[in-house]
Amino acid sequence: MKLLRNPTARIFRSVLQSRRSGRIWIGAGVALTALAVLIPNSTLPLLTLVSLIGATASGYLAPAKRTILWLGCVALVAAVVVWAGPGELNESSLQWLAAAIVLIIVTAAVIYYIRKLEERAFEFSWQAEISAEAAELGVFRWDFESDELHANQKLRELLQLPSGAKVYGKDVFEKVHDQDIDHLREEIDHARKGGRNYRAEFRIKIDGERYRWIAGRGRVIVDPRSGALSLAGVNYDVTDMKERESLVSKLIDGIGALFSITTPDGRILELNDFGEVLAGVPRDEWMNAQFWELGMWGRSRETRTAVRELVKRTMKEGQVTDEAPFWKEDGEKGWALITVTPIESDMGEPLHLCICAVDISKRKTAEESNTLLVQELNHRIKNLFSVTNALISLSARYATTVEDFADATRKRLFALHAAHNVGAVDLKKRNADLREILTTTLRPWRTDPQRIFINGPSLNLDAGAATAWALIVHELVSNAAKYGALKEADGKLVIDWRDDEAVLVFEWREESYRFSSNGDPDDKGFGQTIVDRLVDGFLGGEIQRSVTDQGVFVKIKIDKETEE
C-alpha cells in the first residue's frame, strides 16, 4: 500500500539503499551484460555496445571500487562472446569488438579514478568539518560576483546570521561595528587585488552596547573554469583574548605607560587609557589607525619614519627597543622608550604586536643636565685659571711693593671665591638681590679709580633666578676680563637695569678706546651658549648683542610673568 501511495519516493529510497548494499547495482550490471549477449548484434550492434558500457558504469554506484573492475571484466568477456563467437567473426565484428574493448577499459578506468577522487574529497571533507567543529571555526566562501555567502552553522552563530536562509555579503556588513567597516573593506580589497592573504579583526554588534570580536583569515580563490573570484576562509571568536588584553592595558595604566596591541603591519587594535591621554586622541580616531600616525609623534616625518621602521624591524628581529621623541598635548617635547614585542601563534605565524612606550623625559633631562654640568665645570675651571691670571696682572699693575701685590691678589682671590659661592647659591635660600649678586661677582675687578658702575633698583630673585643671574654675570665679566673692557687700563663697565611692571631690562655696556671688534673669540663659544640658554630657556627672555670698535653692548629683556 505504501508503494502504491508514494511509488516515486519508495523507488528512490530503494535506489539509495541499494547503493549501500551494492546488490541492485551489481544485478543491474549483470542484467545489462546478459542483454548485450541476447541482442542480435548483427542488426543492433550499437545497442549491444551501449549495454556493455552501461554494465561497466553501473559499478560506479557499488560500495566497493573492485566491483567496477569485476563488472568491467564481465563486460569484456561478454563482448568477446558477442563478436568473436562461433560464426560471428568477420571484419565488422572485429571492429565492433575493438571499439567495445577500448570503451569498456576507458569507462572502467575513468569511473575508478572518479571514485578515488570522491573518497579523497570525502575524507578531506569530514576532516575539515571535524576540525572546524573542534576549533569552533566558522567556515565561509563569499562569491564576489553574486555576493552570496556560503557559511556553515558556526559562522552563522558568530555573525548573528539566520540559520538555513541564504545570506549575502551585505548582510555581514550590516552586523559589523561602524568603526570597523572601512578597515574590513580595505582588507578584503587588498586580498581581492592579490596584495596579500585576507587578515582582519572586527567587531560584530550583538545587542545594545555589546559586541563580539571576530578574527578572520582566508584567501581569494579562482574558479578554474569560469575565472570567477571568491573569498574562502574561516572566522573565529577572539573576544576573550581581547578582554585579557584590555585587562593588561588597565594594569599597565597604573605604572604610567602606553600599551597598544596592533596588527603585524602596525594598525592599532587596542590602546590603553594612559596611551590615549598621552597620544591626545579619542578612541574613534586611533582605532584602526597606524601606530606611527598618532599625533604624539608630531609633524616630523623623520620621527614618524623612525617609529615605523622600529615596528617593521620586529618582523625580522623579534623584540626590539629604541628611544624616540614625542610631543605632549600641551606641545611640550618628551622622550619615550619604545619596546615592540611580536605575539606569535603555535605555528610561528605573527598574530599581533605588543607595543609599550614609557615616558623617560625626566631621565633624558637629567642626562642632558649632567652633561651640561660637566661641560660647565670644565669651562669654569678654564675660566678660573684665566681670571686668576687676569687678577694677578691687575694687582701687579697697581702694586708698588711685593707685600702690596700679595695682599691685593689675596683679597681678589677671596672675592672671586665669594662670587663663586653666589653662583652656586643654596637652593634652600628663599631669594637673593640682583645688586648683591652683581656687587659680589664684580668685586675682584673693582679698582681705584673706579671703573665699574652699577645702577639699578633693588630686585629680589628666587633661588633659581639668582643662580641663573650669577652665572650670566660671571660669564659676562669673565669675557670682559679676558677680551673686553676690563682687560684694558682705560676700560669702563656700566651696568643698568630697569624694573618695569611687566618687563625687566638689563643693560651691560663695556667702553674702551683700545677695543677691537675682532677681538672677541668667545663670541660663539661655550660661555655665549650658557648665557643664551639661561636667558632664553630658564628666564624666558631674549638677549641682544652688539660689538663695535668702542666696546660691547649686551641687552637682556625678561618678561616678569615668565620669570615668575
Image: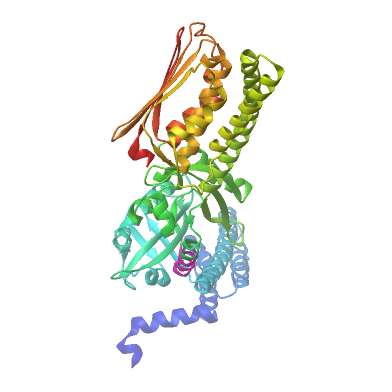
In depth, the one of 482 and 7 nearer the eye is 482
Residue 320, given in percent of the width and then of the height, sits at 60, 48
- Residue 563 placement (x, y as % from top left): 38, 39
- Looking at the image, is 205 positioned above or below residue 384? below
Name the quarter where the C terminus is drawn: top left
Q: Main secondary structure of the magenta part?
A: helix
* Residue toward you, 335 or 244: 335
Q: Nearer the viewer, residue 455 or 24?
A: 455
Range of residues picked out in magenta: 235-248
The correct choice, above or below, for 384 with respect to 312 in the image is above
Image spot of residue 347 (x, y percent): 61, 59
Residue 504: horizontal and vertical position, in percent? 35, 31
Residue located at (50% from left, 67% from top) = 54
Residue in the image at 49% along x and 81% along y: 18
In this rendering, the count of numbered labels is 0
Compared with residue 449, is residue 54 higher up or lower down, i.e. above or below? below
Q: Is residue 400 visible?
A: yes
Q: Is residue 313 magenta?
A: no
